[in-house]
Image (tube, rainbow, N blue to C red):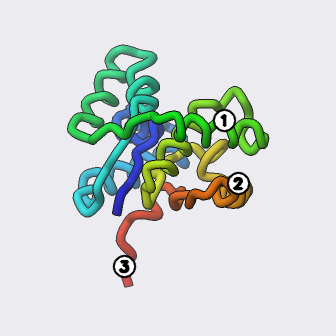
Amino acid sequence: MRVYIETTIPSYLTSWPSPKVVHAGHQISTRDWWENHREAFDLFTSLVTHQEASSGDSDAAQRRMHSLEGIPLLAITPECESIAQSILAAGVIPAKADRDALHIGVATFHSMNVLLTWNIRHIANATIRQELRELIASLGYSLPTICTPEELLPQSL
């Protein structure tokens, strides 16, 4: 299974433990998936993720970038940018979140099975996913499954 790693994954993976219960839970499940289950998947990312991960506090950026080492970069093609522009033009994602649209464009164009993210506001949102699915289909592509690391953890019976 081909998994596109969006910027929130290395952010949750490498950040200091959060005092907020929900964020701490996300950090724990991200680390669990990363340390114990990611080897079962083919991971990919893009220059967008690298650009976002390398910004901000230099120590935190270094940790984020270190976590991305060895993960192949997918090209940001004109088709990726066109998909992103269509998402923005349709108003599915606000213009200020143009990088989020580009993550979706890259993952879609390169036929990823999964777009892994904690970005609930603009990507892993049930309402947005449905609108994205319809829009992406109208462009002739298939939207990757958008989910969080918790959704990729093995199910126990």
Can residue 141 be seen in this snapshot? yes
Can residue 25 be seen in this snapshot? no
Q: Pointers 3 and 2 in contact (CB under 8 A)?
A: no
- Residue at mark 3: 156
133 left or right of 108 in image: right
| Residue positioned 72% across, 29% down in the render | 95
- Residue at mark 2: 135
Q: Secondary structure at mark 1?
A: helix
| Residue positioned 33% across, 56% down in the render | 33
Q: Secondary structure at mark 2?
A: helix
Q: Residues within 10 Å of mark 3 (few under 14, many from 20)?
A: few
User: As drawn, which residue projects farthest toward the bottom?
Assistant: 157
Splitting the image into 4 quarters, where does residue 102 fall? top right
Of residues 17 and 146, the one nearer the viewer is 146
Q: Amino acid at mark 1?
A: Gln
| Residue positioned 73% across, 56% down in the render | 131
Of discs 3 and 2, which sits in the foreground?
2
Query: Which x, y percent locates residue 49?
Result: 43, 32
Looking at the image, tell me whether mark 3 or mark 1 is earlier in sequence order: 1
Figure label count = 3
41 left or right of 106 in image: left
Q: Residues within 10 Å of mark 2 (few under 14, many from 20)?
A: some
Q: Amino acid at mark 3?
A: Ser
Q: Amino acid at mark 2?
A: Leu
